[in-house]
Image (cartoon, helix red, strand yellow):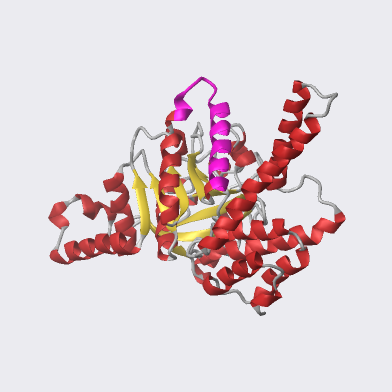
Amino acid sequence: MPEEAFTDKLCRLAYQAIKNTIDLSDTALLAEINTRSGDPEASMKLVEVLNTVENVNIPSELVRVVETYNKRRIIIHHDVGLQGALKPDHTVTDLLENGIAELIHIGETDQGDKIVVPNNIEKIRKIGMAERLIRGRVLTGFNGLDALLTEGFVPGDISVISARPNIGKSAFKQNLIINLCEQGRGILNVVPEVGFQKEQDKLDAIRLGEIITTFYNPDLWTDDFKEKWQASVKYISKNWKYWCQPDPGISFARTEYDIKRFVDEGLNIVFVDLFDRYKELSEGDNMPVNIKRLLNRQKGIAIRYNVHICNIVQIRRMEGNPLAKARKFRPTLEDLKDAGGYEEVSDLILLLYRPAKYLPEIMDDHIIVIVAKQKTGISDVDVALSVDWETLTMEDMDEYTLHEYSKSGSELNGEVSTREVEPASGDSESDW
């Protein structure tokens, strides 16, 4: 579609930015958003969305137009408030109330109308289509898991990866980081618990397929190993957009500063391992309230800077004999409900389960990733990933291995297949 199809110069510039930087199969849809809306607000919103997309170079003229337009809107609303309040029968209180009302109107308009009227439905829906086309999906790199996820780690959302102690939360996160960095995503890895060197050792072990303990025993460092290790360090330094924050006394205020600092350099996703190490959570006696408050703060930052924030969270230990209570060890959302708002605030929750940790009859060569919540797709579904615990490497399970795992699981638990098992819901005999 020619640029002349747009209603004004602003729209043409927006279209040009899309056409020159993003490969979309249906650019006509984006053109139609502007031409049929007949509303400059739609154009402004589209430009603001484009301005958050990595590698999209918005023309400086367009940026200035949008900034001027937004400033003019504020001035106009102030003027409307003043005109209404300066009537002969109005008081100073009326002036303040009118001014506040107009400013609130600006905020509500910027966030989208609370009530969508019929003649706005098409316009708003098409703007939503454009946002999704531009944003796309942010996948994990595990094919089986990605088939279950509608959007993945998309910007503006927060997520949780949770499990009981010693299940493999950090190893799963490290495999995700490698997959995402290889896709070109920018990652901030907040690791106040383990520190930089140990975190990088695990990333190198996974990348190279080397036994993790080798990195701590110089007697095992052959020339070939040292050469591969040095090459891995160099590769990460040169090819990844990767930042690591290992401060053991980390506060979320510091993370917020780091996000603001690196977002213009291509930061997309922030991993926090572990979330409860934040200094703010040690203040006050009511931990659940503090957690919910911090999660809401995270959500606001994720939206403001257009990044995704993923929190690694530990589910409490269970008391008693593990074998006697093995079927209760499969985590559910119930484990997070009273912990401080994780279930309520998070857009995506992944729970990890390591069957062999509690059921010796099953080989310790896999973990189960449970999609416990996703706001835009199906939940209470799971997939198995194979794991080499010596190297911490995780991969999709092939069909044969998955079938054998499902078979062994069904024999032990009386189920047909792990993919068909109803999610654990408490004391049911069918729970793992």
In the picture, measured across the screen, residue 428 lies left or right of residue 169, that is: right
Rendered image quadrant of residue 47: bottom right
Q: Position of residue 111 (x, y in %)?
A: 68, 46
Residue 156 shows in this picture: yes
Residue 145 shows in this picture: no
In the picture, measured across the screen, residue 58 lies left or right of residue 429, that is: left
**Residue 306 or residue 405, whichever sits in front:** 306
- Residue 297 colored in magenta in the image: yes
Q: Dividing the image into 4 quarters, which one contains the N terminus?
A: bottom right
- Magenta segment's dominant SS is helix
**Residue 229 or residue 345, whichever sits in front:** 345
> What range of the chain is rendered magenta?
280-304
Q: Position of residue 277 (x, y in %)?
A: 42, 34
Residue found at x 68% / y 76%: 4
Residue found at x 72% / y 46%: 109
Rendered image quadrant of residue 419: bottom right
In the picture, measured across the screen, residue 83 lies left or right of residue 284, that is: right
- Residue 130 colored in magenta in the image: no
In the picture, measured across the screen, residue 33 lies left or right of residue 424, that is: right
Q: Position of residue 182 (x, y in %)?
A: 40, 65
Q: In this view, which residue lies farthest toward the top?
A: 285
**Residue 182 or residue 297, whichever sits in front:** 297
